[in-house]
Image: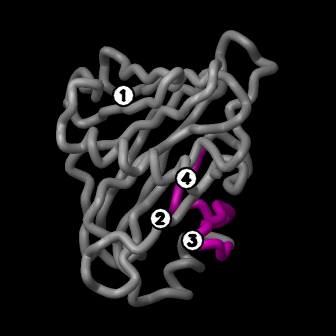
Amino acid sequence: MKRLLFCAVVVAICGLITGPASASKGGGSGNLKCFSGAPATCTVSSSGSTVTLDTHNGGYAGAYLTNTRNAGAALTSVDYTFNYNCDPVDDSASCVGGGSPRWSIPIDTNGDSKTDGYAFLDAAGCGSDGVVSTTEADCGVNFQGADYASWDSFAAAHPTYTIANALPFVITDTTEPGTTLISAISVTRS
């Protein structure tokens, strides 16, 4: 069931990337966009720096930065980071659970630039401390059912893997209803 949901999300994101009316454009830079599947909602702040993902009633919501395709980049040459805060109104609400919020990073395993799978870094696997990043030594990675202690250990185990020609995205689809504030989404390439 989770695999079907993930496939539906990926299809929805691919549709958003081509520019449907439901994508939200961030304020300032115009690079931050969000998506959601009913009944969840997603809004980008007027400054374009924060995304509010509301999954109080179910569904999924997420965000991505446009122009962050890094096709062919070595895993060691790209860093992915985002910060998150759970519901600021209800301190007892948790937005961490079921593998979200998380990065979904497209991976090419055979050199054809196509996505052969997604590497996942989620809040719980990164210590639930408000940051999910490939630069954190204790931020676990899951790829095709295998777990790695960190992005560096994933890259070391698969030195020929590269980033596929697709956009990485942050998503929350937790079964824990709540509001997740996502900020400081960053994709950098050295």
Q: Give the Cα separation between the discs numbered 2 and 4.
A: 14 Å
Q: Give the Cα separation between the discs numbered 3 and 2.
A: 6 Å
Q: Give the Cα separation between the discs numbered 1 and 4.
A: 31 Å
Circles 3 and 2 in contact, beta carbons < 8 Å? yes
The answer to whether 186 is drawn above or below residue 182 in the figure is below
**Secondary structure category for the residue under label 3:** strand
| Residue position marked by numbered label 1 in the rendering | 49
| Residue 148 seen | no
Q: Any mark on residue 143, and which? A: 3
Toward the viewer: 96 or 35?
Answer: 35
Crowd band around label 2 with a 10 angstrom C-alpha radius: few (<14), some (14–19), many (20+):
some
| Residue position marked by numbered label 4 in the rendering | 4
Which residue occupies 57% across, 73% down?
144
The amino acid on which the numbered mark 2 sits, given as a three-letter code, is Tyr
Q: State the image coordinates of residue 36 (x, y, percent, origin top left).
A: 44, 30
Mark 3 or mark 1, which is nearer the start of the sequence?
Answer: 1
Please provide the residue range marked out in magenta: 131-148
